[in-house]
């Protein structure tokens, strides 16, 4: 009977894997269609606004060695986005062409990349929640329906950089999980901190996204958090362990929380939830030693 059941299980796994592949391809094609249409509409409306010419002039002064001024030897603040000004200055310095054309091209690239990253982050977020079907980019249809998005995807202003920062920040935050290393977290924090340099009002977004990153890291951290007050556990003395499945914060995955207390000793261990444990499970048992924790967890998972 065991040999007869294995092919059916493997066949079901293959069918499920095939469905996931087709769902991912369908989602990818839908996202690419939206991105291509948005890029075409933005390219058709390419232009430089009057405020965009101010940025272009400031970049010319920077490349001429006069600093970020509108007129030489005048101390004035003429731009809204310092990051966009210096990014455009670096791009124009490397390319060496018309700065106005550089502003249009760079803004278009940033806008399209921002939308692509936002869609990729939304897809990753839905897959983390367990959604397996084809995902339709309904939210991305809003920029396709409003002409203002087409116009200011270029315009020489920082709108394209703003879309890039929003999409990149969203993609980085939803990608944070228990496997994220310190480098990934530092990169995400640095990108979030650039909000005020993109636009001054994005400082609010920096606070919100920073809080989201902190919550996501606390809820998905694989490390063991320990707090000890009083005496350390003595061998042979029983532990009182409470096992309770809970759903923490904004993280879609369930976790199993093990809390042990004895003689002022307190420790909380976060481990992955076993699929067979129900969300309302709550078990209290006595453990004689740390080595019995794994056996206890195995016993709970079988009940």
Image (cartoon, rainbow, N blue to C red):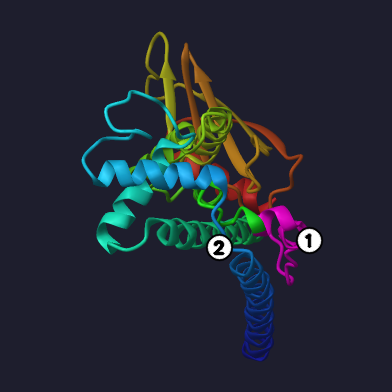
The residue drawn where x is 55% and y is 35% is 209
Residue 156 in the image: above or below residue 23: above
Task: Name the quadrant containing residue 27.
Answer: bottom right
User: Camera-side residue: 112 or 184?
Assistant: 112
Residue 130 inside the magenta-drawn segment: yes
Q: Is residue 13 above or below residue 123?
A: below
Disc 2 versus disc 1: distance between alpha carbons?
15 Å
* Residue 171 at least partly seen: no
Q: Which residue corresponds to the image point at 44% horizontal and 43% vertical from the top-left? A: 55
Taking the spot 51% from the left edge, 47% from the top edge, the residue there is 52
Residue positioned most to the left: 65
Q: In which quarter of the image is residue 297?
A: top right
Q: Which mark is residue 145?
A: 1
Give the crowd class for mark 2: few <14, some 14-19, many >=20 residues within 10 Å.
many
Q: Can residue 293 be seen in this view?
A: yes
Answer above or below: position of 154 versus 190: below
- The residue singled out by tag 2 in the image is 112
The percent position of residue 150, horizontal first and vertical second, equals: 66, 59
Q: Is residue 91 magenta?
A: no
Where residue 200 appears, as percent x and y from the top left, is 52, 29
Q: Are marks 2 and 1 in contact (CB under 8 Å)?
A: no
Nearest the eye: 52 or 7: 52
Q: In which quarter of the image is the N terminus?
A: bottom right
Question: Which circle's residue, 2 or 1, is located before the other in the chain?
Answer: 2
The residue segment tinted magenta is 129-150
Instruction: Report helix, strand or loop for mark 1.
Output: helix
In the rendered view, tell whether residue 98 sits above or below residue 64.
below
Toward which corner of the image does residue 37 lie, by quadrant?
bottom right
Q: Tag 2's secondary structure?
A: helix
Position in image of residue 32 (x %, y %):
62, 74
Q: Give the image location of residue 12, x and y in percent.
A: 69, 83
Q: Which mark is residue 303?
A: none
């Amino acid at each position: 009977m065991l040999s007869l059941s294995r092919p059916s299980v493997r066949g079901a796994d293959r069918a499920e894997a095939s469905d996931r592949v087709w769902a991912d391809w369908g989602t990818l094609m839908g996202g690419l269609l939206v991105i291509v249409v948005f890029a075409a509409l933005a390219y058709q409306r390419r232009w430089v606004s009057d405020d965009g010419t101010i940025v272009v002039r400031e970049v010319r002064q920077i490349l001429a060695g006069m600093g970020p001024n509108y007129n030489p030897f005048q101390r004035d603040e003429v731009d809204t986005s310092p990051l966009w000004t210096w990014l455009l200055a670096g791009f124009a310095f490397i390319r060496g062409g018309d700065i106005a054309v550089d502003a249009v091209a760079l803004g278009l690239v940033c806008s399209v990349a921002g939308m692509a990253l936002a869609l990729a982050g939304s897809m990753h977020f839905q897959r983390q929640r367990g959604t397996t079907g084809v995902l339709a980019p309904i939210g991305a249809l809003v920029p396709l329906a409003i002409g203002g998005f087409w116009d200011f995807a270029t315009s020489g202003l920082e709108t394209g950089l703003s879309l890039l920062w929003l999409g990149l920040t969203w993609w980085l935050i939803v990608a944070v999980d228990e496997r994220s290393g310190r480098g990934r977290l530092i990169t995400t924090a640095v990108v979030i901190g650039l909000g005020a340099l993109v636009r001054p009002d994005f400082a609010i977004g920096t606070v919100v996204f920073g809080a989201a990153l902190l919550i996501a890291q606390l809820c998905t951290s694989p490390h063991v958090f320990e707090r000890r007050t009083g005496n350390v556990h003595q061998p042979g003395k029983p532990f009182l362990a409470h096992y309770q499945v809970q759903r923490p914060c904004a993280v879609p995955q369930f976790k199993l929380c093990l809390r042990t207390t004895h003689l002022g000793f307190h420790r909380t261990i976060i481990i992955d939830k076993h699929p067979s444990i129900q969300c309302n499970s709550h078990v209290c048992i006595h453990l004689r030693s740390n080595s019995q924790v794994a056996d206890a967890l195995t016993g709970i998972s079988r009940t």
